[in-house]
Structure formats: structure tokens, C-alpha cells
Amino acid sequence: MTFYHPSLYVEFPSLKPYVERMQSLPGLKEYIDDPKHREANMLISAPGPCKITDARNKYTDWENTNINSVGVQAEKDENGRFSLELIKKKAVSHDTYEFEFKHPNANQSHGVWPGGHYMIFVNGADGTEVSHPYSPVSTLDKLGSQTYVIKIYRPHKDFPGGGKFTQALEKVNVGESLQFKGPVGYIKYNGNGEFIWQGAALPRKSKIGILVGGTGVTPGISIAAASIFGNDGCDVKMLDFNKTKDDILCQDTIDGLKSKNSKKFEYKHVLTRDPNWNGLKGRLSAEMIKDFFGASWEPEDHVFFFICGPAAFDAHCKKVLSDMGYVKNNNFNNN
Ligand SMILES: Cc1cc2nc3c(=O)[nH]c(=O)nc-3n(C[C@H](O)[C@H](O)[C@H](O)COP(=O)(O)OP(=O)(O)OC[C@H]3O[C@@H](n4cnc5c(N)ncnc54)[C@H](O)[C@@H]3O)c2cc1C
């Protein structure tokens, strides 16, 4: 039983009766499967009566869907926070872990819209609370839990104290719970080229550039996945900046996107401090944009770059794009 969803083909076993009713609508399946109607992906509002929205009218009504407006269904405190239990903690590189948190409801996805995130809270080493945004890497078809890939900032000569949040997180054990809030985020990708920036829809896009640095790859992947799994026809190209080859995150997920649609998704890793790297090197430049994205990515309304990385990375990307004539909040985001 498959729903067409902007992030993935999502299955909701509890909605079987609605799906059966929907599938019995004369001609609907043929309509959806016809490549001409690829744009008309379907939206299912759960858990209420099944609602189908044609993409060309309003692709996704996140606010009114169970999946997104409430995120994870959990008991919330007066500040809107809820607790999730850590059920798996696995080192995936020298400084990065996968953290999996259990949902109270086994049938629920993480409910974060593409481009969004949760705020997660921990108590730092000095006992004061710290929180940061994190975007789950598990996709919306994963029910019952959500997974994050989080890099730990250990003490370093340039940062003798290391990262406050991530060092505290590294000490959290399986079986302990952390507080979450959200989902939140200024930018939402609704699929079919529709980006919402602070509540307002941007002109529809057909080309989505993703410029991400380090852990910024996680929200970038959620947008790419929404377009590729939703089969929404957009061209998606990503430049993923890291210091060295060992710092590259989520390669399996990126490979999965590439294998899903190699024509609509392209990516390159760019390394800034790896002398042995034969691929793209250095910081983002106008030349890199022109070479990788190509002539059809001129600053026009249908082109959008999603930027996410450390503050200096974001500022640099925005400057390069602005100098090339791209316009903030139309051709690129400004968070
Ligand atoms: C939308 C969004 C989604 C995000 N999703 C993720 C995610 O999925 N996974 C993830 O890991 N992060 C993610 N981040 C980044 C995350 O929010 C934090 O900024 C990051 O985890 C650092 O937290 P910290 O408290 O440990 O570091 P802080 O104490 O806040 O340190 C600040 C900065 O100092 C620098 N720094 C500190 N110590 C070191 C060191 N040893 N070496 C090099 N630099 C250092 C880093 O640039 C660090 O970001 C996301 C950010 C955004 C905006």
C-alpha cells in the first residue's frame, strides 16, 4: 500500500481502509502512474479522513497533516518539549555517531518537513542547558524511531574547550532520554519545486542547488530526498564541502539518492584540507558554480540554492552567489 509523499513513498498501515477506498476511485491509479502526471503526487492527511491534494494546487499542506504539524506525538511540557529515549548509539567515524531515538508511538515517523529540524537539549559539562538544531537522517517512511548523524567536537588546539553540546551528547548512554522541541525551521521544501520561506511560497523552482558544509549535509539530504523520492522532476545538484575525506558524512544515504535517480541527482565532494584528493578542492567560487551547475543555472526565478553549514561557510556562499547576481530569499536561503 503506497502513498505518494513528497519525501518518500510512505506507508501507513493504519490507513488501510482509506487507501483501499482511494485505490478504488476509477482511473486514479492510472492517472498517478502516467508519467505526464508525475507532478500530481498525492498527499494523504493522517489520521483523519483521507485527503488527496493535487500537487498543482497545493502540493503539501504540512500544517494540517499529522505527519508534520505535531512532529512526534508525545506528551509535551508547558514549553512544548518532549522526551525521547536513546535506543542506539553507534560510532560511524573517528568523531561521528549515529544516535537513534525511540518514538512513544511505534507507527509514527519523525514528522520533520524537508529542510526542517528539531531542537535537542542536553546539560553541558558545567550543568547549564545547551540546545542546537539537528535534522534527522532517517526518512519519513521510518516509523517508531528517528536517527541522527552527529559530529562530536572534541577539544582542539583552536577550540580548547571543544563543542559544548556534542561533548555532553557523547556521554549520554542508551536508555537515557533527551528533550526535543519542534519541528522548527524557516525553510520548508514541499516538493514539486515549492519552497516556503518564513511562511511565504517562493516562485516555483525547477533547479535545486545544495551547498552544504560538514554536518549541514543532513538538512540538505532531506531536501534532495524529498525531490528524488517524490519524483518531482526537479534537477538536484549538491556540492558537499568537508575538510578531509574522513570528514565526509552520510555517504551511504547520498549513494542511495544517486542510485534512485542518477539523471536528476548529481553531487560532488569538495575538500578544503586534503592534499591527496583528486576531486574538487578549496572554498566555493563563482568558477565552481559555473563549472558544476552549468549555464542553465543562471540567476532566474526557477533556480534555488539551499545553503547550510558553519556560519562562516554560509556567509561565504551567500557572498559568492550575491556577487554572481543571485538574490537572497529568491535564489538562495538566508538563515
Ligand atoms: C538546520 C541545522 C541542522 C543541523 N543538523 C546537524 C546534524 O544533523 N548533525 C550535526 O552533527 N550537526 C548538525 N547541525 C549543527 C549543530 O546544530 C551544532 O552547531 C553542532 O553540533 C556544534 O555543537 P556544539 O555545541 O558541540 O559546538 P559549539 O560549542 O556550539 O561550538 C561552536 C562551533 O565551534 C567549532 N568547534 C568547536 N570545537 C571544535 C573542534 N574541536 N574542531 C573544530 N571546530 C570546533 C565548530 O564550528 C562548532 O560548530 C545542524 C545545524 C543546523 C543549523
Image (tube, grey):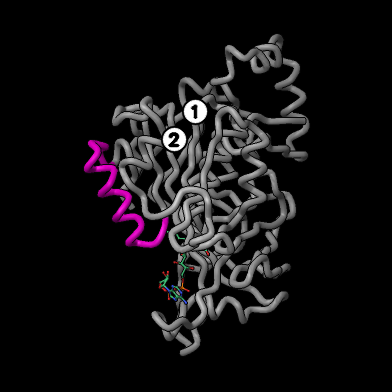
Q: Position of residue 193 (x, y in %)?
A: 45, 30
Tell which of 84 and 291 is nearer to you.
291
Earlier residue among tags 1 and 2 = 2
* Residue depicted at 53% across the width and 24% down the height: 233
Q: Is residue 69 magenta?
A: no
Q: Identify the residue at the far bottom of this view.
A: 126
One can see residue 44 in this view:
no
> Which span is picked out in magenta?
309-328
Three-letter amino acid code at the position of disc 1: Cys
Q: Position of residue 60 (x, y in %)?
A: 51, 33
For the residues marked 1 and 2, what is the alpha-carbon distance in whole angstroms?
A: 7 Å
Tell which of 63 and 149 is nearer to you.
149
Residue that numbered label 1 is attached to: 234
Image quadrant assignment for residue 145: bottom right
317 is higher (above) or lower (below) than 51 = below
Asked which secondary structure carries label 1, the reply is loop
How crowded is the residue under tag 1: few (<14 C-alpha within 10 Å), some, or many (20+)?
many
Total marks drawn? 2
* Residue depicted at 41% across the width and 53% down the height: 308
Asked which secondary structure carries label 2, the reply is strand
Image quadrant assignment for residue 305: top left
Q: Is residue 321 magenta?
A: yes
Provide the major secondary structure of the magenta segment.
helix
One can see residue 130 in this view:
yes
Residue that numbered label 2 is attached to: 208
Proximity of marks 1 and 2: CB atoms separated by less than 8 Å: yes
Tell which of 294 and 135 is nearer to you.
294
**Relative side of 125 to 200, left or right:** right
**Relative side of 138 to 240, left or right:** right
